[in-house]
Image: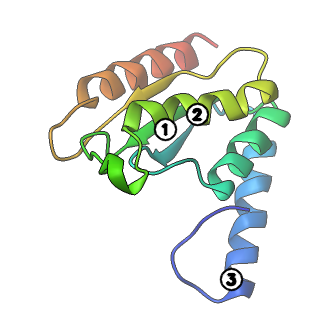
Amino acid sequence: MFRFAAAPHEIRTDWAKFTKDYFLNRPNLVSVFLLVDASIPPKKIDLEYASWLGENQIPMTLIFTKCDKRKKRKNGGKRPEENVEEFQNLIREFFQTAPPWIMTSSVTNQGRDEILLHMAQLRNYWLKH
């Protein structure tokens, strides 16, 4: 269910178990940042990851990457905004409240300041609780 670097199946399984256990047994976890490629339609593995986090009530922030990339319409490509909206619609049922989300681009620095602000807000929340 969790995506990791190209590695043998046994190692990926160990990583997935470790990651799940970490998220489930970490009482001071404030938010998991889930990075999703916005230049392509939602992928099954990303939807499974997001739904698992939601079903287990693990706080999550969606970070949509590659928002500067535009796919050609004639090839069936969608704009990043359309892919983001579709992803959010597909995971909505797994959350009581829609998770926060930020659109980013490493090429244009879009979302950089928003991520830093969000991290500061999460840190302040953590310090108070």
Q: Is residue 24 left or right of residue 6?
A: right
Q: Amino acid at mark 3?
A: Ile
9 shown above or below 15: below
- Tag 1's secondary structure? helix
Q: Quadrant of residue 9?
A: bottom right
Q: At which x and y percent is residue 88? A: 61, 29
Nearer the N terminus, badge 2 or badge 3? 3
Q: Which mark is residue 83?
A: 1
Which of the two discs, 3 and 1, labels the residue nearer the N terminus? 3
Query: Is there CB contact under 8 Å for labels 3 and 1?
Result: no
Mark 3 neighbour class, 10 Å CA radius: few under 14, some 14 to 19, many 20 or more: few
Q: Give the residue type at disc 2.
A: Glu
The disc placed on residue 70 is none
Q: Which residue is mark 2?
A: 86
Can the viewer see residue 56? no
Q: Which residue is mark 3?
A: 11
Q: Position of residue 55 (x, y in %)?
A: 84, 35
Q: Is residue 53 left or right of residue 67?
A: right
Q: Is residue 26 above or below residue 7?
A: above
Instruction: Kindly identify the residue that appears in the image at 64 percent across and 13 percent down.
Output: 129
Work out which residue is located at the far left of the displayed protein and give it. 108
Is the Cβ of the residue at disc 1 closer than 8 Å to that at disc 2? yes
Q: Residues within 10 Å of mark 2 (few under 14, many from 20)?
A: few
Up-down relation of residue 106 to residue 17 (above or below): above
